[in-house]
Image (cartoon, grey):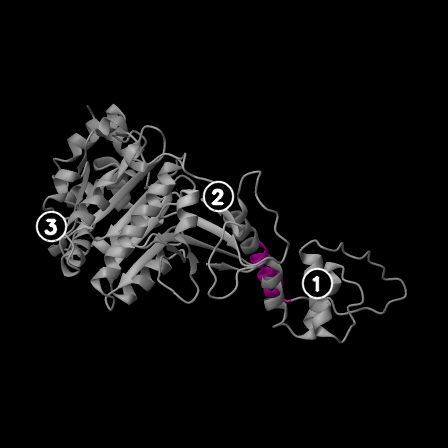
Amino acid sequence: MRIESLQQRYREYLDTLPLSVLRILGRQEGVGQVSSDNKGDLVEAIVSVLTGEKKPAPRSNRGARPKLTFLDPAVRARIEEIRRQGEAAQRVVLEVGSGATHLPPDAAVTTGILEIEEGGYGFLREMGLRVSSENDVFVPAPLIRSLGLREGDLIACALGSLGKDEQLSGAELLSVNGQAAGPYHGRPQFSSLHAAYPDEQICLAADGDLSLRVIDLFAPVGKGQRVLLYAPPATGRTTLLRTIAAALPAEEVVPVVLLLDERPEDVTEFMHGVKNAHIVYTSIDECAEAHVRAARLVAERAKRLAELGRDVVILLDSLTKLERACAASGKTSDPVRQFFGMARKCTEGGSIAVIAAADESGGYLQMSNACIALSPVWAERGVFPAFDLARCGTRRAERMLAPQALAAASALRREELPALLQRMKESGDNAALIASIKG
């Protein structure tokens, strides 16, 4: 992913503004001699002040005629947005240790997820993990081996001395997973981390959504949970996945949505409805190998984050599609089991939770430690969310829920779904619902 410098972002926007607007903006920012007819010089002067390279000139209105000072608020809003985007890009790229190289203000930088090919060499793929050979940076095998780089690493590098068709060297490397460039052989291996049952719940129903309240009470999802979302067709699976994704607290976990073999219009809806998650997708016009590859890269990226102690939540739609893609590409079902099986809480720190949809429970139910089931019976009757409460549940839920909540869930399971949903609506939130249950 090419990240433009803050100066470049400002220049590209300011070049679109008429000279009269630039003069007003220059006056407000403290740029001297804004009456210049040279638009390029005025843009550079404004950029210098906006980026802090030059201090604003002191204002003096003595003897001056009144000048037009109204500036369209949209211009000021766009400049503020560019500033925030620039700060975010700098955090992504330059959050490195004390040994980091200090770049010149106008340096061009690229970041990408490392994908390693069979020959041992690799490429830096864009954050969406789409293949784009024209822009992807080639990473030679000797550099990967010498630094101990792994597939799924987020790498930032400078492009100042990196010409077209040239390969990355250690000199251009800035950071790996936010850490200063250097050997990474000493970091833990995900496969060597010890797994434990989740004991920290991810509370989803902060806004009171009814579907999420049901999940929080009857099938709580913890950090490191392996959740099977059993959802036959036409039971509201896509809507529920979108609702869960939008509710994931990005300040606590790294939310990732993986949509495989998906209709393009459904991908667009997901992107419009979910703003807090990284969305990786493959569409229906791509080959089976592309679906398998996307799943592998998402899994490897999640493992690298867990090794760093981060908590990741992946929503997959779906295990059924991934299994179908494995069969079509001549692979065994091992990639499916490996993807779902990687979900775990690590005792050393870090976790990967996977909420994976499937048309049929099959052997996945035995692999899971939590199940969210949707019922075609209730869906046919028009009852939504169409939960099958008898099949919903979480192993060792007592590690996350209080005894009162467990007792309430046990009592409420005996109610018919429509009556339960009505009771939940009337209670307002789960705390009030639990308090209303008599032991």
Q: Secondary structure at mark 3?
A: loop
Q: Secondary structure at mark 2?
A: loop
Q: Which mark is residue 360?
A: 3
Residue 54 magenta = no
Q: Which image quarter: residue 29?
A: bottom right
Q: Residue furthest front?
A: 142
The reply to whether discs 3 and 2 touch (Cβ–Cβ < 8 Å) is no
Badge nearest the viewer, 2 or 1: 2
Q: Which mark is residue 369?
A: none
In-front residue for pair 103/122: 122
Question: In the drawing, does residue 20 fall left or right of residue 302?
Answer: right
User: Of marks 3 and 2, which one's residue comes earlier in the chain?
Assistant: 2
Residue type at mark 2 is: Gly
In-front residue for pair 128/433: 128
Residue at position x 13%, y 57% from top?
Answer: 327
**Magenta region's main secondary structure?**
helix
